[in-house]
Structures are given as C-alpha cells and as structure tokens.
Amino acid sequence: MNIGKISTKYSQTIITEDFSIKPIDIVDNYTKLSILVALAAYNKTNYIFLDDKFNKINLQFLSKFMSYVVNHPNSPKKFKFKIEQNINTELSNNKKNDIPYDVILSFSGGIDSTAGLLYCLDNKLKVLPLWVNFGQKNKEAEKKSINYILGKLNIKNLLKSEIDIEKQILKGWKDWDFIVPARNFIFASIANSIFKSSNNSKGMIFICAVKEEMRKWKHRDKSKYFFKTSSSLFSKDSEKNIYLCSPFEKYSKTEVLYWWKNNWEKKYGISPHDTSTCYYNFKNPCGRCRACFRRTVSLLAAGYEIDNNLQVNPLTDPDNFIKNIWIPEINAGKISRTGKLDFYIAMEKSRHALPSYLLEYYNKLPWQTMKAISRRKKEILSVKLK
C-alpha cells in the first residue's frame, strides 16, 4: 500500500489579539510529511510520496531519520521508509507573518509541558502554546487541563491544530497501544511551519522531555539525536535558525516537580494536580497505566501527595505491574538510577498502601541502596532550574 496523499481532514486556527495566521500557512512540507509518516506507520507501509519539495535536504537521510523516529520497541514492524517528493513542485518561501514569540511550546496540559510554560514565564520568554488534537483517547482531559491552566495564567493565545486520524489511532491501538507514531515530530513540524512562514530569522520550539526520557534509546522522538537532527533539517529547509529542544534536558521529572513545589506553585497558583497525564483518562485517571505510575512516583518523591482523583493508587499494584514488570526491569538494569531511587522514595512514603510483597521487598533493600536513597533525597533538595 502506498501513502501518497493526506486524505484526513485537518485544520489549524489561531485566535489572538495581535496577529493571525491563515490555515494554509501551517500546512507546509514537513507538516504534510509528519502526518504521512504517522499514516504510513499505522498502515505498515514503507513508501511515502510527498506532493511537495524540501530545500537542501537529502531524501535518503530524511528517510532514515523518519524510520528512526517510528522504530519504537513497541512498533509492529521495523520500518525502512523511502520518501519521494514531487520534483515538479516549486519551492514555496512566502514570508507572511510577524510572529511576536520567542518560543512555540508543545502543550498538552500535562506535567512536563505545563512546567515548560511556567519555565517560559519565569524566564520572560514570549511563548505560544500549541495543542494538537489528533483523536487521542485522553483529548477531553487534555482540553480541560489546558483551559484551566491558561485561564488561571490569563494566557489568551493558543494555537490549536486538529488532525483527524482518530480512526487510524483506534484501528492501530492493538499494535501501538497509547503510542501515536511520529507524535512529537508532528508537534515540531507544525511549530516549525509557523516560524518558516514568518518574517522571523529564528525560532525556538520546546518539546518538554525530561532527562530520563532523553537518555533512553527507546524514546526515539525525545532523544538528543531527535532534537539535534530535527533542528538541522528545519533550519536547512527554511534557511533560518530553528532550534528544537527541551528546557529540562538536565533534570528529572521529580526534580522539575520539586522546583515547581518550592518556586512556581505560590507564584503562579498552578499545581501539578491541575495537569493531566493518563493515557486512558476519560473521566478520571486510571492509576493503572505506566504514565499514571511514573507520575505518582515523581509526585511522591518531590514531596507532593498522590492525585486525589485516581481510580486506584498505582502503588497498590492493582494489575501486578510493579511485581511483574517494574521490579524485573530494575533488576535487569533497564531503569535509570534516578528512576529506581525515586521509586524507593515513593515506596517509603506509601508504606501504608503497599501490598505485603512490596513492603517485604522494600524492607529487604540492602544498606548500600538505603545510602543511595539518602543521597538522592539530597540531590532533589539541592536542585536549581536554570
């Protein structure tokens, strides 16, 4: 099966007080490519034909990079994309808008992206939040968090992008679970198109990955290589300085949350509990998925309580995720040092909730591990976001 056209309906709108962008300005070559890559991944095909052109971009390298982005350990096959472009299409380089922003922020209303928003405000960066609705299962929860957070901060400008691939997501759920292939590349491409179609000579795009995500090879679209290569491709194509990065490259989620608790919460009136993370959140977060588990661990390790609207406390291990997956991953060395120690801190603070086998596991931790936990607590207390 060949993927050659974008047949899904999608639109982008910006409603602002000081500028406006027409939808057509956002649909450029990389925006189209990002959607086609997602569709190709869902349809398990390797061939992509783009009715558009790239400037100064090697298509063989671009094909390899797109293959890298979607070849997650959970992908249903190993992709080896071949991208072709319409050689008869003229390059478009119309500059139409003055964008009064330093940063376009990929914003989902989750902990990391909300922290990114507060980081921008703290550092006096002019920021435009971008939310993409592509039919994800937790879209209503994201909307609710986004509206509350932006309302509380009196931020009126939000870039909303709708890409109708909900049918593909639901059809591909068995193969991909919660993963939307090329998700962060879609975010980055839309943000890039805004800067590309502007009079700005440079632009910064934030996708707020944290340290443990950027250092793990399986997080392809959050890796340092992903950020560096995307920046290079966008910059060459637009002949501008486009920089894709994360402000939290050097910090774990727990460290960001600790800084939030002691610096941002009182200043901005926004709590991490106002954010949404769960992959399966229709009414309340499930407490069973990996996202709920990692969120709860980081909240507890940073000094917060668990979310009070969870359907179930993840540390009660309702589906034996900790017993059958998390602890074996720790023993196999697949969990980072900070991830492992933050989990132990969370266990310490939730002794009353732990099932007997987890309480026994914690009580048998060797003294060397207990010393490492103490050092980790001091690291968290000394964190300073820059």
Image (spheres, rainbow, N blue to C red):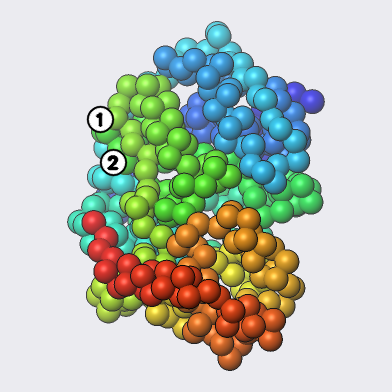
Q: Looking at the picture, how far across and down is residue 364, in whole percent?
A: 59, 79
Quarter assignment of residue 270: bottom left
Counting residues from the start of the chain, the first of labels 1 and 2 encountered is 2
Q: Position of residue 132 (x, y in %)?
A: 52, 50
- Kindly identify the residue that appears in the image at 47 percent across and 47 percent down: 215
Q: Is residue 199 visible?
A: no
**Residue type marked 1:** Ser
269 with respect to 326 (left or right): left
| Residue type, mark 2 in image | Ile
Label 1 or label 2, whichever lies nearer to me, is: 1
Category of crowding for the residue at label 2, using alpha-carbon neighbours closer than 10 angstroms: few (below 14), some (14–19), many (at least 20): some
Q: Secondary structure at mark 2?
A: loop
Q: Quadrant of residue 271?
A: bottom left
Residue on which disc 2 sits: 99
Residue farthest toward the bottom in the current orientation of the protein: 352
Mark 1 → mark 2, Cα distance in angstroms: 10 Å
Residue nearest the viewer, comparing 132 with 120 = 120
